[in-house]
Amino acid sequence: MYARLLAMLCLLPVSTFFAQADSAVPTGATLEVYVKGQESSTPDVLRAMNRELESLMLPAGFRVVWRGVSDPPSPAGAEHLIMVELRGVCMAQFSSMASTPLSFPMPLASSSVADGRVLPFSWVDCTALNRFLAPVVSNPSQAVQDDLYGRSMARLLAHEFYHILAQTDDHATGGIAKARFSTADLMADHFDFEASALERLRPPATVASSAVSDDTSAAGR
């Protein structure tokens, strides 16, 4: 399915949270991510999501800058901009969802497509994600569940960002850019882009700079 990831098997002040997320990110091609629906999540889940997505996009040469939908754009502008919608209640609700697991493959996340182009508009189905993970999550700690849920959201978004930034409906053979995720993929301590996907993602300036500074370096985990 084109640019779509299938499943196999406290309110937060927007501007305050995302302003805090801006300050500690490294340099790179600027990727501004505007998030709609974060008010249905929690600070711990959003922090885990932000941290994981920044970690996943950095090797590809992108500096993630988080914005709320009501925030003004960066004065200097951004090389890349993506709008993200978090649909449903985006917090760990594994105990209440354990009795209604996903019974058939359905999209956990997707991006808009028009005239053969993958548009910079992505969404995550938070209810479906809860139902997908609920049967295999056994740790009762809410902190652990929040971290797991936030990291899973980030991995779904990173997959969609791959399609948007690389402008492709192709998938890699493994890693974040592969066609389908298992629960094990989302729950793993580490789950990254494989080397071929990183090469497709890297902005041209990043690739050229890498070639000049170290012509023996290769992308990898």
Image (tube, rainbow, N blue to C red):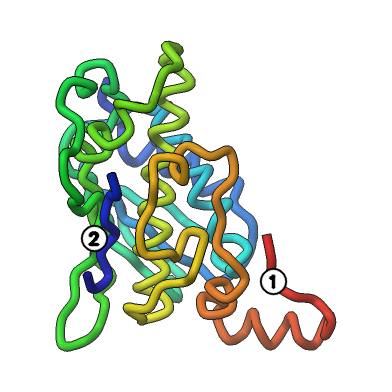
- Residue type, numbered disc 1: Ala
User: Mark 2, residues whose alpha carbon is within 10 Å: few (<14), some, or many (≥20)?
Assistant: many
Q: Is residue 132 visible?
A: yes
Label 2 residue SS? strand
- On the image, the x and y values in percent for residue 160 come to 34, 63
Residue 130 left/right relative to 144: left
> What amino acid is at disc 2?
Ser
State how far apart marks 2 and 1 are (Cα): 26 Å
- Work out which quarter of the rendered image holds the N terminus and state it: bottom left
Task: Between residue 25 and residue 217, name the one nearer to us.
Answer: 217
- Residue depicted at 60% across the width and 60% down the height: 58
Which quadrant: the C terminus?
bottom right
Tell me which numbered mark, 2 or 1, is placed earlier along the sequence.
2
SS label for mark 1: loop
What residue is disc 1 on?
219
The image quadrant that residue 153 belongs to is top left
Tell me if label 2 and label 1 are in contact, CB under 8 Å. Answer: no
Q: Position of residue 121 (x, y in %)?
A: 24, 65
Q: Residue 150, position in %: x, y? A: 41, 36
Residue at figure coordinates x 26%, y 77% from the top left: 118
Question: Where is mark 2, residue-wise?
Answer: 110
Residue count near mark 1 (Cα–Cα under 10 Å), binned few <14, some 14–19, many ≥20: few
Task: Give the camera-side residue of 72 and 114.
Answer: 114
- Can residue 69 be seen in the rendering of this structure? no
Question: Observer-nearest residue: 191 or 31?
Answer: 191
Tell me what residue is drawn at x 55 percent, y 55 percent. 56
